[in-house]
Image (cartoon, rainbow, N blue to C red):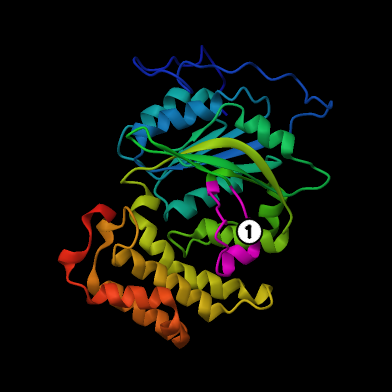
Amino acid sequence: MTEKTGAFPDAPDGQLGWPWDTLPEPLPERMADGRAWPKISVVTPNYNYGHFFEETIRSILLQGYPNLEYIIIDGGSTDNSLEVIKTYAPWITYWISEKDRGQAHAINKGFSRATGDLIIWINSDDVLLQGALRSFAEAYDAANEQLIFANVINFSPDGSQDDVIQTGIKLENFIGIPEPEFTWHQPGMAVPRSFYQQVGGLDESLHYIFDWDWVCRLLIHQPSIVPLDVFVTKFRVHDASKTGVGLMECWMEAPDVVRRYSQYLHGIPARRVAAFYRLRAASLYFCEHPGSQRYWHRWRGVKSLLQAVGEDVLVILDGHFIRLFIRALLPKALYRSDTG
């Protein structure tokens, strides 16, 4: 870690609020029960997100958390990311900028460097809320380690926000047909490093749902979780985000993950669940949901329907399949623009 010299950088002109000009009260030397604060390792992968990155970095470093290890893995950015990193380098435990094999590889590189009791992964376009690390630390029990899931706020450039309350976090909802109330969001998760050491890192062969796959392995290892009913992270929703452009690919990768882990639970009809996710992909191609207009593509939708039948022929009796089949026959002009 570079020696800390000088004052912490001021916020750029015109930037107001957390984490720009709102500073936290310093935490006491020890927790309220007398325990030392657990060491928390925060890993941030980045590639050409310099226009968001400074806000992410400040939100982590300004937590006022006394036992923080902050690791940044940059994939050889060509924008202003390195300039931003170097501005805060004295307060960053470790950083590197070099070409990597993708996001999962970058995160794994960070995990391998982590030495904390807890590991938290925050992408370079997201923001930790004030007191987030304190909340995770107070929920952590070294004698009874568990996964910690807290709540997340999705926020958009237009100022709109959507609260994501993490509920139904259990293996059945990740590898089966999820319950209606099931919601989860990776930026609200903290993982004991001992769990990572036992189950390994992210599967780099997956491009979109490596986080989902990782959670499955973690829940197989330790199904008990700590639900933390506080908001800890703001997740930035924007057109260039991987989630924004890759939702379709998420559903396309899901059947493979379902098949990997269905053996760990009795009564999980893997082929039926795989068909369920093929229908989810088709529903985007046929603009069944708000915001899905960008995905409209009749023949890819038809292909997804056929793939669903290939997974489980009985899906043709499913009301969702029938509804999508009818949509596949409609002329494009009848697809309502207000769903996009």
In front: 324, or 279? Answer: 324
For mark 1, give the secondary structure.
loop
Q: Is residue 254 left or right of residue 93?
A: left
When the figure is inspected, residue 198 is found, relative to residue 8, above or below; the finding is below
Magenta stretch secondary structure, dominant: loop
Percent x, y of residue 272: 52, 79
Question: Range of the magenta residues?
Answer: 166-186
The residue singled out by tag 1 in the image is 200
Residue drawn 38% across the image and 58% down it: 247
Residue 181 lies in quadrant = bottom right
Residue drawn 39% across the image and 28% down it: 84
Percent x, y of residue 165: 57, 45
* Extreme-bottom residue of the structure: 313
Quarter of the image with the N terminus is top right
Mark 1: which amino acid?
Answer: Gly
In front: 88, or 145? Answer: 145
